[in-house]
Image (spheres, rainbow, N blue to C red):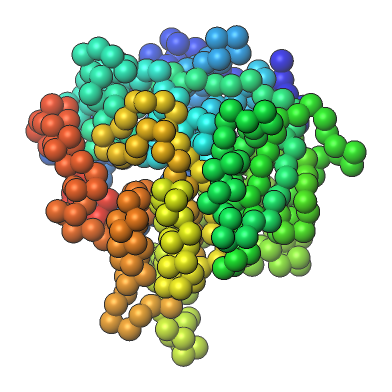
Amino acid sequence: MSVVGTPLNAPPLVSPATHAAAVADLLRRYRELPVGTRMRLGKKSSNLFRFGAPPAERLDTSDLTGVISVDPVGLTAEVQGMTTYEDLVAACLARGVMPLVVPQLKTITLGGAVTGLGIESTSFRHGLPHESVREMDILTADGDVITVTPEGEHAELFHGFPNSYGTLGYALRIVIDVQAVEPYVRLEHRRVETAGLEKAIVEACDVDASDAPDFVDGTVFADGHQYLTLGWFTDEPGAAGPSDYTGQQIFYRSIDTRAGDVLTIEDYIWRWDTDWFWCSRALGVQNPVIRALWPRRYRRSDVYRRLVALDRRTGFSNRLRTLTGNPPEEPVIQDVEIPVDRLAEFLHAFHRDIGIEPVWLCPVRLRGQRTWPLYPMKPDELYVNVGFWSSVPEKPGEPEAHNRRIEELVSELGGHKSLYSTVHYDEREFWEHYNGPAYRALKGRYDPHGRLPDLYSKVTGSGRA
């Protein structure tokens, strides 16, 4: 049964036979590439913030972008690896379920979230997207397709695949857990003082509490000015009906002006995509006049990201700053996980040394006792993802000083840093953080000829990528 507010144009399911034919075609094209050819799977969009990768042969994957099946009784979905969450969510909501964790942006792919990382406001309950995976078919560097599960012959690849970013292979088919949903989400925006922030997060994330929320995240508008937003599934649309933040109204601004709210489940899932959290303001999209003229179908994260990529390629904004007598700016686009009891320390240093506002907070705890060697987090420990996406004036002679300061701070506080954006660790320190011995063992078994780049060179741009 579909859920109220879900799109009527949910994509049709892909038959197993069609999927098998698409895999066979991809394998044929992959195996025809000359040995030593730089290769990556081609996607229509990217949510990475590492620009300027070396040229490589792009293998078209447009036939691997669908949902094979959704089981609302067994609570699973079988999905092709290059499927966007936009299409996956539409297929799931049409059947009354959703993935356990849906990263915030529509064009993130399931395979990308599993081999990289993803997070959202269900992560205090359900961990990271790769923890929802039951099995995967992975295209290896040597052109074979193997099925990996938590146990069995390839269990080490199953556990080592997250945070490998396509350097150990590519997921072509993924079976994940899903959960049943209600039509709406009821929200409470709770102002929290800095001194009580850590305690408030711990209490909000107590899944055994009698009225434990289904969703928890937070927004820091300025030093000492922050909210936790708690959400509960509901079948009630609210007295005034659900709010709509896909038009002139902007979701993050409502947090500071409304104590409560109701959204459809679809609008809640994509509440951050319409304005790319708050980053659309840098493109003028939050100006009421520009917003009225900006077509609604183009108010989405992938459009904004393409505009940012164009600016990075041309250097237009920094040239304009130079012409107007302003210093060039350093992009600071990062997500980091900080142990909850060190969060106040991080925010204090961040406000002092970096000064970006707003900042997103998202509690996360591993779903179970299983560990993931390339992104080591402690089972049962509550972390808080801190996300910040902006730019600050460069320090003269130190073009990456702010990003390096963040890496130092994360290390000092026992945290972890996602690798979708710029990385400045030297090679020794990088492998200390991301389990070099485990990675080298996996690389030796699943890419013995080095056909794919290694993780350090890929994320730092220091070699083959």
State left or right for residue 364 relative to residue 224.
left
Q: Is residue 124 above or below residue 210?
A: below
* Residue found 40% across the figure and 30% down from its top: 130
State left or right for residue 136 relative to residue 152.
right
Q: Nearer the viewer, residue 211 or 308?
A: 211
State left or right for residue 349 relative to residue 95.
left
Residue at the farthest right position: 239
Residue 34 visible (yes or no): no
Q: Nearer the viewer, residue 173 or 352?
A: 352
* Residue found 25% across the figure and 55% down from its top: 460
> Where, by quadrant of the figure, is residue 402 drawn?
bottom left
In percent of width and height, residue 386 lies at 47, 53
In percent of width and height, residue 430 lies at 21, 51
Q: Is residue 114 above or below residue 143?
A: below
Residue 463 visible (yes or no): yes
Q: Nearer the viewer, residue 189 or 157?
A: 189
* Residue found 43% across the figure and 78% down from its top: 393
In percent of width and height, residue 363 lies at 51, 43
* Residue found 38% across the figure and 78% down from its top: 394
